[in-house]
Amino acid sequence: MNETVIDELKKIVGEDRILTSKEDLLCYSFDGTPLRKFMPEVVVLPESADEISRVCKLAQKERFFIVPRGAGTSLSGGAVPSEGGLVLSMTKFNKIIEIDIENLTITVQAGVVTEEINKAVEKYGFFYPPDPASVKVSTIGGNVAENSGGLRGLKYGVTEDYVLGLEVVLPDGDIINTGVKTVKNVAGYNLNKLFIGSEGTIGIITEILLKLIPVPEYKKTFLVCFDDISNAASIVSKIISSRIVPATLEFLDNKTIRCVEEYTKIGLPINAGALLLIELDGNKEKVEKDTEKVIEICKKGKSISVDVARDEDEALKLTEARRSALSALARQKPTIILEDVTVPRNKLAEMVKEIDRISRKFNITIGTFGHIGDGNLHPTCLTDERDENELKRVEKAFSEIFEKAIALGGTISGEHGVEISKKKYLEKMIGSSGIKIMKKIKKVFDPNGILNPGKIF
């Protein structure tokens, strides 16, 4: 990144949208992932796909790396420049381009904050269901690149279930569009699915066409307490097998409950071994009927108590308390390592027991919460990066957790992605042949390896 390259970048985006001072660059040296800090050489803030295309063509000519970055909420190191080079900040791509109620779609730029999408369409009686815990700050482009999930994933699915089309700048500077507004589209390969979850390694997403659905007419939210983690985990399969699919089915263990209550002070039972936050939505008659059935299942499943939210405000407080789990835990120690494993629902009880056993084995503190309805758990370690001996134990502990998830027929990541944090575990999951084919795909799109290097593989 010599002065000649910097001058060429200034010609593309203007001097006011290039950052080179150490103080400015520091902000882009880390994301939501702990222990991953790498200084970029320059940060560029483009405003159009054409500008990004020209930056990519310059990168091909001068052979420098490009790391796309949204809001920096990544929990797997996706937004950090681990090999140096240029960080391409997408914050200027913050426009909602079109709301098309007739076709139930919204077209947005990649830098739009995810929560703003729902704010824009709720007055029409529609919503965009995927809601990662970072919904208030994360951007939709990052959500697509990581295929983010969220609290409503059990019933409504994840990001990929709502992406109809993308505008993407390829590493060689070509700009492609991958979809249309129609419900059906099988013309050629499904390029949408290829770019969704690609973690910024094969293209830079600039614009997204999303599907919308009607807001459910009625909902019920309730909190179920258990004295034992296993009882809480085992109840999940019983609810699903009874043909009830909650919109939200979330889990907090005792460590997380205590931290959240200290943080929010909403009256959570701090002596409970585990909590389930359950929300049912849809037709009022069915929701009321299903609520009775779920409460009956929970009582038979050794729950201590079942408390139904009295009104919408109380329901919102419970949901926001769950969303605050990471922030609440982060207040306890200097360093927090939030991980992400997913197992089949009938293996949940075994997995949460194993996480508890592993934390005791390595004498570390792990609080576990997550989207237990779809088998997605977030074991979260409270530690201090200055304690090298403890960090070594933490790494060994998570290695065992990942291996256990794989052994139970699960995955090393349900929504955070691989990026830097888990790339050494990927081959254990998909095998050497799987790694080989992924590398071939990367080579087709990015033969010179300029885009987000050092990630996934």
Image (cartoon, rainbow, N blue to C red):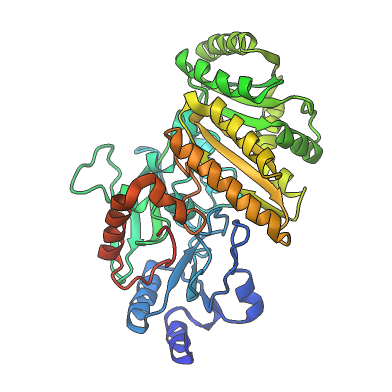
For image coordinates 44% across by 39% down, the residue present is 406
Quarter of the image holding residue 262? top right
Find residue 372 and report its horizontal and vertical position in percent.
55, 30
For image coordinates 31% across by 61% down, the residue present is 442
**Vertically, is 420 above or below 106?**
below
Q: How many marks?
A: 0
For image coordinates 79% across by 26% down, the residue present is 271
Find residue 92 and report its horizontal and vertical position in percent.
51, 65
- Whether residue 262 is visible here, answered yes or no, is yes
Q: Residue placed farthest to the left in the image?
A: 188
Q: Is residue 216 left or right of residue 357?
A: left
**Vertically, is 369 above or below 217?**
below
**Vertically, is 192 above or below 404?**
below
For image coordinates 35% across by 72% down, the residue present is 53
Find residue 140 and report its horizontal and vertical position in percent.
48, 51
Find residue 131 and report its horizontal and vertical position in percent.
53, 40
Looking at the rendering, in which quadrant would you find the C terminus?
A: bottom left
- Whether residue 118 is visible here, answered yes or no, is no
